[in-house]
DNA sequence: TCCTTGTTCAACCGTTTGGTTGATCAAGAG
DNA sequence: CTCTTGATCAACCAAACGGTTGAACAAGGA
């Protein structure tokens, strides 16, 4: 199941339990049993959650005797942030443009210099098809 | 399905098609059929995707004759950004602290002025339990 | 009015997901 | 060596997901 990285990260964080695990790992590393303790689900279920987080690259496991400390890998967050910021900024820019258009609508004082459409901004096409 | 807002947003963006739709709506509003055109799925499937995005608050639909233009609501992005930033920052701070501890391990040059822990930042506790 | 266009509703289907229980494996501690 | 502890593997289950097809519902345009 080689779903693209971004989908895996978003999907991993779409679960409240998983998000809470991430929140706790941001404070300190922890073992599976430690992580499972606050929730009313089996340790196996939490182990599965961790495998999802690991698959998304959000978490890594090392080995310390029979314990398997879980560690948060915060770099992957940048992937999301980049995506979000890109499109949020683009949308905001669009609203700005719309506002500008609306602002100059009331009185068209002769032939306006601006073309019908503002320059269609040369952002790289092709999102995630 | 009253899943919490954050879960719905993450879940909505966990699908590549849905993410691509958002990307395209960031450029301009569009109708369902317009949105469906580039993909090799039925219009109904895209309509379902839009309902998911709408449920997450990422998108809104107005009415223009028999057309239903879809509009991107970028504010919801802030919800995600807030969550991500909070925990990323916390994790980064933890690494900073660890680095600091490691840095002063070799030679403890007498009583240091700085406290053992930097002020433990007054972020609101309680993630998503 | 009838017809066409855009969209949604409804039922169905295969796969994935989040959870369970029970067995198994790995590594100390006695 | 044996026993306990921490974690995973395996099989199973109900619910949700992403997709399909077919019918129904607006709202213009002829």
Image (cartoon, coloured by chain):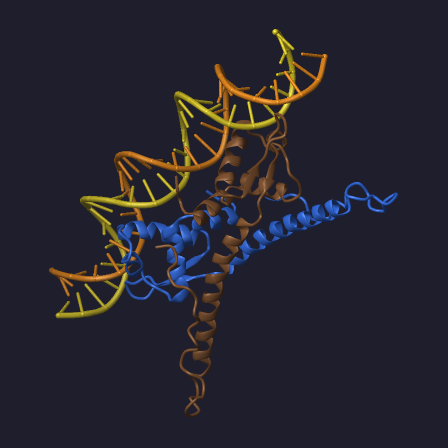
Chain colours: A blue, B brown, C yellow, D orange
The residue located at (51%, 39%) in the rendering is: B54
Vertical placement of A10 versus B98: above or below? Answer: above
**Residue B114 picture location, percent across and down:** 45, 84
Is residue B42 visible in this depiction of the protein? no
**Residue C22 picture location, percent across and down:** 18, 44
**Residue B46 picture location, percent across and down:** 54, 32
**Residue A63 picture location, percent across and down:** 34, 63
The residue located at (46%, 62%) in the rendering is: B87
Vertical placement of C20 versus B34: above or below? Answer: below
Vertical placement of A13 versus B33: above or below? Answer: below
Residue situated in front as seen by the camera: B62 or B16 = B62
Is residue A68 visible in this depiction of the protein? yes
Vertical placement of A124 versus C6: above or below? Answer: below
**Residue found farthest to the bottom:** B110
Left of D2 or right of it: where is C11? right
The residue located at (88%, 43%) in the rendering is: A111
Residue situated in front as seen by the camera: B122 or A87 = B122
Left of A41 or right of it: where is B10? right
* Screen quadrant of the N terminus of chain B: top left
* Screen quadrant of the C terminus of chain B: bottom left
Residue situated in front as seen by the camera: A77 or C15 = A77
């Amino acid at each position: 199941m080689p779903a693209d990285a971004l989908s895996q990260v978003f999907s991993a964080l779409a679960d409240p339990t998983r998000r809470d695990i991430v929140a706790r790992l941001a404070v300190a590393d922890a073992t599976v049993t430690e992580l499972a303790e606050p929730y009313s689900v089996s340790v196996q279920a939490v182990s599965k959650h961790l495998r999802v987080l690991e698959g998304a690259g959000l978490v890594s496991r090392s080995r310390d005797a029979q314990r398997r400390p879980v560690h948060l890998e915060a770099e992957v967050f940048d992937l999301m942030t980049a995506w979000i910021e890109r499109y949020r900024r683009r949308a905001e820019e669009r609203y700005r443009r719309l506002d500008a258009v609306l602002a100059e609508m009331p009185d068209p004082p002769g032939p306006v210099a601006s073309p019908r459409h503002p320059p269609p901004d040369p952002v790289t096409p092709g999102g995630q098809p």
